[in-house]
Amino acid sequence: MYWPGVRKRQLLLVVVTTTISLFATSFMVESAQSADAPPRKILSGWIPYYSMDTALPSAVANGDLIKEVMPFWYTLKSETKITDLYTPANPNVPISTPITTMRDSGFTIIPTITDGTAKAVLAGLIAQPSTRSQIVATITALVLKNNYDGIDLDFEGFAFVDGTASWNSTRPNWVSFIQELSTSLHALGKVLSVTTPVLFDPVSGKKGYYVFDWASISPFIDRLRIMTYDYSTSNPGPIGPLTWIEQSLQYAISVVPASKIYVGVAGYGRDWVTKVVGICPSQYSSTVVAGAKAATFVMSKAAGLAASYFAVPTYNQAFGEVNFTYEKTYVGQTSSGLATICTATRTAWYQDARSYAARAQLVAKYHLGGIAAWTFGMEDPAANIAVRQVAQSVAPDLVLATLTSDQSSVTYGSQVSLAGTVLLTDGQPIAGLAVRIEAKSVGEELWREIGQLTSTQDGIVITSLIVGKTITLRLSSDATWERAASQSAEVTITSSRLISVVAPTLNSMGIPITISGVVQPHQAGISVILEKYVAGKWLVVNDQIKTGELGDYAISTVESGTGIKRYRVSVAEDSSFAQSESPIFAILVL
């Protein structure tokens, strides 16, 4: 059984076993691509272990909107144990299958870990440096084992189980834990995401769940996903009204860079009983009561629910949500076996396509990182269409970068001139754009920055570079809200070693000829050979010799005939340098 609107921490108590046939690696869905410019990838969301057959296909189908996903698969049970929730729920589909599908879709994979401990246990673990460090190590090991791109923490027990009296003591330990986990993950190039309920500006007197201390953890996290839903739970009302969301957002962007922030959107609605006339059958007597816990439904079923009771949904512009009221009759027997009937008045609230669009507009208004859907697979398809339209309207301009060099092959220490351009797709130059010259040598995987430039009014950058070894270059610019990141095509400049030669111009036949010099860059152990031009070919005339500590060499040869002899000194190609030759020199042998 599955209740989509139940808070995520509660879902961990539900064991669901599902046979999945729709998300094998070969699963393919035609995405609703637009003929216009690609949309900004503002959509992220959770893929729960208990609904893989709907959540993953939904994400794949909307891959043009999605940069990253959060598999909702793990719960922390102790400082050394993280329980895998995916495998028991999906015994016939190995975890590697959905991971491969996500990677093939180009998604950044940031799985969520929830707090699976009892009341105050996790707070106690992070209070002790030793157990806090052990949790950091356990989480880091999980990321490394599966080569995830990072981790998302959804530790809601602090807020909803431990009690507000614990918050002041938990808060500094939480900040220390986040700092330590950030250090561990960032050392590996991994992302740290944190999901929390809402907070508000303390000055306003409306603090929210301040135990999560956004201001203090801001320097250490890469993502902040705000659960801007569950505003109304006990009484009928909106799931997450826009004004409430904006109040939290305005505080969030004052303490956390806006680009790190993601607004939660709800794929579920709630349905409350507000009035009951008559005596309800015994099986409904505890649930069909005014003020009883609300039922939940997924967004994709909302229109059908309203239509089945001839209700007319109304969109509330201020809240950015939909509600409708209907009457439902329950027929059955009392506990004593008497026939009975009751009629309940019920009120439902949920978010629809307009709601998702309104929240996506907040991304544009505040230049946020995006929205985060709880969860993929619950939404009406129209909601993703609405998000796509907003995402296209705020899509960053594409930047076309080029880089050229006046030389493709040089000797060690030579200077090359580089010229680059940065243009919009319509050919308009981009003035004042900060760009980087990045380099990578043979065998290196990571690019390194070797220079920073700013484009002219004509979108041009010009610079020069002294080349040592063979190198590959590119021109790059970072993404901003207005423009996408860019990278030029790679330009490789091949370098050869510089070989100097000291040799006599005249020598007697049969007398040893000594030829010496230096190979640059100075390096010991480089194999050097002497070649002679004979009958239109260069022939090796001696065994290889090795350079000394300063790159110096000395070669001896003997000529058995007279005449003008032409020579050169050469060094074979290696991973850093091309085949290298000295200038040709001549010796008259008498």
Image: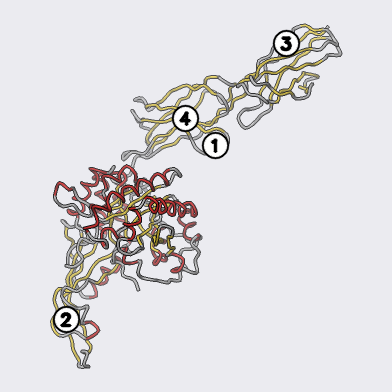
Q: Residues within 10 Å of mark 3 (few under 14, many from 20)?
A: some
> Which amino acid, by three-letter code, is at mark 1?
Glu
Mark 3 or mark 4, which is nearer the start of the sequence?
4
Q: Who is closer to the viewer here, 122 or 467?
A: 122
**SS at badge 1:** loop
Q: Residues within 10 Å of mark 1 (few under 14, many from 20)?
A: few
Residue at 42% across, 72% down: 17
Distance CA(mark 4)–CA(mark 1): 20 Å
Residue 25: image location, x then y, percent: 50, 60
> Which amino acid, by three-letter code, is at mark 3?
Ala
Distance CA(mark 2)–CA(mark 4): 74 Å
Discs 2/1, front: 1
Q: Who is closer to the viewer here, 508 or 188?
A: 188
Q: Write down the residue under mark 4.
A: 403
Residue 215 higher or lower than 44, as above or below? above
Q: Badges 4 and 3: C-beta atoms under 8 Å apart?
A: no
Q: Is 445 positioned to the left or the right of 426 in the image?
A: right
* Quadrant placement of the N terminus: bottom left
Residue 137: image location, x then y, percent: 44, 51
Quarter of the figure with residue 542 = top right
Q: Write down the residue under mark 1.
A: 444
**SS at badge 3:** loop
Q: Write down the residue under mark 3.
A: 503
> Which amino acid, by three-letter code, is at mark 4?
Leu
Q: Write down the residue under mark 2.
A: 343
Discs 2/4, front: 2
Q: Badges 2 and 1: C-beta atoms under 8 Å apart?
A: no
Q: Residues within 10 Å of mark 4 (few under 14, many from 20)?
A: many
**SS at badge 2:** strand
Residue at 67% across, 18% down: 552
Discs 4/3, front: 3
Q: Residues within 10 Å of mark 2 (few under 14, many from 20)?
A: some
